[in-house]
Image (cartoon, rainbow, N blue to C red):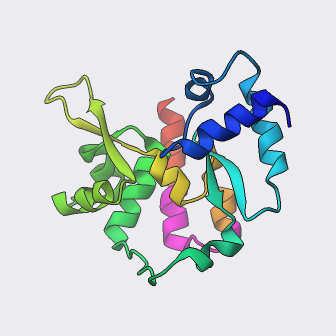
Amino acid sequence: MDEFVRAIEAVLFASSEPLSPDEIALHVCDGDVAAGLCSLAERYVGHGIELVERGGRWHFQTAPDLAHLLRRTREEPRRLSRAATECLAIIAYHEPATRAEIEAIRGVQISKGTLDVLMEAGWVRTAGRRESPGRPLLYATTAAFLTHFGLSSRRDLPGIDDLRAAGLLDPLDETALTLELESDRDED
């Protein structure tokens, strides 16, 4: 293993949070960080830990098939209400989105607690204010959202054809979604 790749490995191992290639480059001598990361990721395939990239940031994680060995207590799965799940999906697909935009898409008002739950989970963050009357807050997903759902970027979110193939759209939802997509195209 060359010294450059070893240096990248050491930086990632010592870091308490995922790092972007630019952040890694601040700690290692000149070289192709992207190539070093790819080489390192290949080296860890099939091992107890693996090098993964989520949202443009790299970190080591326990291999998914071995994660159960490290849990000392049973994790209680976080159950989101239907309203929270819908809000999270709207934010993920339309970010950045305001509360009013979320409510318009859902067709009902959302309680303040719904967004609070998503923010406490670390999946949603405020992303500034819209330059419109009242300057409403904008909401966007976080890197923790990508990591939790195993996505590299928002582009990896399933499309309508994927959702239909998985049977996750009931006929009423599918009709409403199709109408919404058609109205979005008409506005463009």
Provide residue 180's location: percent of width, then percent of height.
48, 50
State left or right for residue 30 relative to residue 42. left
Residue with the most extreme front position: 3
Q: Is residue 137 above or below residue 109?
A: above
Residue with the most extreme bottom position: 74
Residue 170, picture quadrant: bottom right
State the residue in front, 23 or 168. Answer: 23
Residue for point 19% across, 62% down: 113
Is residue 23 something that shows in the picture? yes
Residue for point 56% across, 75% down: 70
Q: How many marks overall?
A: 0
Q: Is residue 57 above or below residue 159?
A: above
State the residue in front, 63 or 56. Answer: 63
Residue 61, picture quadrant: bottom right
State the residue in front, 10 or 45. Answer: 10
Q: Main secondary structure of the magenta part?
A: helix
Residue for point 61% across, 41% down: 12
State left or right for residue 147 relative to residue 97. right
Residue with the most extreme top position: 30
Q: Is residue 77 above or below residue 88?
A: below
Magenta extent = 165-178
Provide residue 68's location: percent of width, then percent of height.
60, 78
State the residue in front, 163 or 41. Answer: 41
Q: Quadrant of the N terminus?
A: top right
Provide residue 84's location: percent of width, then percent of height.
33, 64
